[in-house]
């Protein structure tokens, strides 16, 4: 349990460190992380695997870890052919308005199909 707690703490610290590296840039080495954060190699290995699993780092054999690009654009899209009734159409409008407010940085586009 202590291993997971330390790995979670290191994970949080490394999330802040990721901003210091350009997309595609080489991330810290294992030895550097061990000495810099005063944790064991097992903690570093677990944390780096978690960061790679979350898509934040890319592991290249015999080369180390590299920062992945986080600036991907994502779109939320709803597709529908026809609404059964006006109540469902109103729910879709409300959802669109809520998503626009909550996620104003994410482009939202509604696609309708010609029938």
Image (tube, helix red, strand yellow):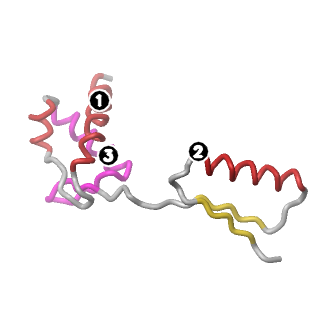
Tell me the residue at 31%/34% (across/down). 12
**Which residue carries the number 2 mark?**
102
**Which residue carries the number 1 mark?**
9
Assess whether residue 44 is covered by the magenta stretch: yes
In whole angstroms, how far apart are the C-alphas of marks 2 and 1? 29 Å
Which residue is farthest right? 85
Earlier residue among tags 2 and 1 = 1
Which residue is farthest bottom? 114
In this image, 94 relative to 49: left or right? right
**Which residue carries the number 3 mark?**
51
Q: Report the number of numbered marks.
A: 3
Q: Nearer the viewer, residue 109 or 54?
A: 109
Q: Nearer the viewer, residue 55 or 75?
A: 75
Query: Vertically, is 82 above or below 71?
Result: below
Residues rendered magenta in the picture: 40-67
Tell me the residue at 68%/64% (across/down). 110
Q: Secondary structure at mark 1?
A: helix
């Amino acid at each position: 349990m202590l291993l997971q707690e330390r790995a979670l703490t290191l994970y949080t610290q490394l999330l802040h460190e990721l901003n210091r590296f350009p997309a595609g840039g080489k991330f810290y080495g294992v030895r550097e992380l061990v000495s810099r954060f005063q944790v064991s190699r097992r903690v570093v290995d677990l944390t780096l695997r978690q960061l790679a699993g979350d898509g934040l780092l890319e592991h290249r054999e015999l080369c180390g870890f590299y920062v992945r690009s986080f600036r991907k654009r994502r779109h939320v899209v709803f597709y529908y052919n026809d609404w059964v009734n006006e109540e469902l159409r109103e729910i879709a409008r409300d959802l669109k308005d809520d998503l626009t407010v909550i996620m104003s940085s994410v482009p939202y586009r509604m696609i309708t199909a010609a029938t």
